[in-house]
Amino acid sequence: MISAKGKRDQSVHRKEILRSKIREIQRLRELERQHMAETGYRKRIGESRDLYRPMLNNFYLRDLDAQIELNKRIQAYRDQKEASLQKSNSGLPDLGSETPRKVRSAMCAREARILAVAEEKRKESEYMQRLEQTRLADEQKAAEEALSRRKMLQCCFEQQIQEKCRAIQKR
């Protein structure tokens, strides 16, 4: 026969075990909550980056389109100017054929520089888009790996808790 003191000691011991289990579960939940909070913060930061990067790329492409349009206007103006120079030269006494050539060569050089800048911007934009795509793919892969690791850790924690419960129940 178990004495009243023995029963009380057993119940106190059982309560302490249950309290320690509850503390362990609370500690694990708190760790998981902290982890989720950190992940949410990182996700928010990543989302804000994801929000402004495509916008920047769009602005960059618009700038490139505007540069191309400007080049077309410059070309039209240059053609118009050359046509007017040819007309004005026809009625004037010979001023020398050097002036139209200088103007033409200067305008061609300027147009070549503008076209080179536009081409460079286009290549840079394509490069940025490729970098963005690889970054997004890497992020997706890392997120999948993190999710699988998290699930694995969660299963391990659950198994450990179940083993501890079985060990406690066997006692």
Image (cartoon, rainbow, N blue to C red):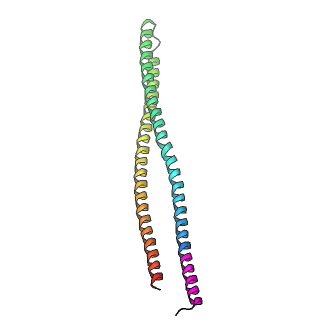
Task: Report the residue at 44% width, 44% height from top.
Answer: 128
* Residue 6 belongs to magenta span: yes
Residue extending furthest toward the right: 5
x and y percent of residue 27 in the render? Answer: 55, 69
Task: Report the residue at 56% width, 73% height from top.
Answer: 23
Q: In the depicted view, which residue is nearer to us: 122 or 35?
A: 35
* Residue 18 belongs to magenta span: yes
x and y percent of residue 29 in the render? Answer: 52, 66
Q: Quadrant of residue 14?
A: bottom right
Task: Report the residue at 43% width, 51% height from top.
Answer: 135
Give, as a single range, the part of the protein colored magenta: 1-20
Residue extending furthest toward the top: 91
Q: In the depicted view, which residue is nearer to us: 23 or 52?
A: 23
Q: How many marks?
A: 0
Q: Is residue 61 above or below residue 89?
A: below
Is residue 18 shown left or right of residue 139? right
Q: Is residue 93 above or below residue 131?
A: above
> Could you tell me what secondary structure mostly forms the magenta stretch?
helix
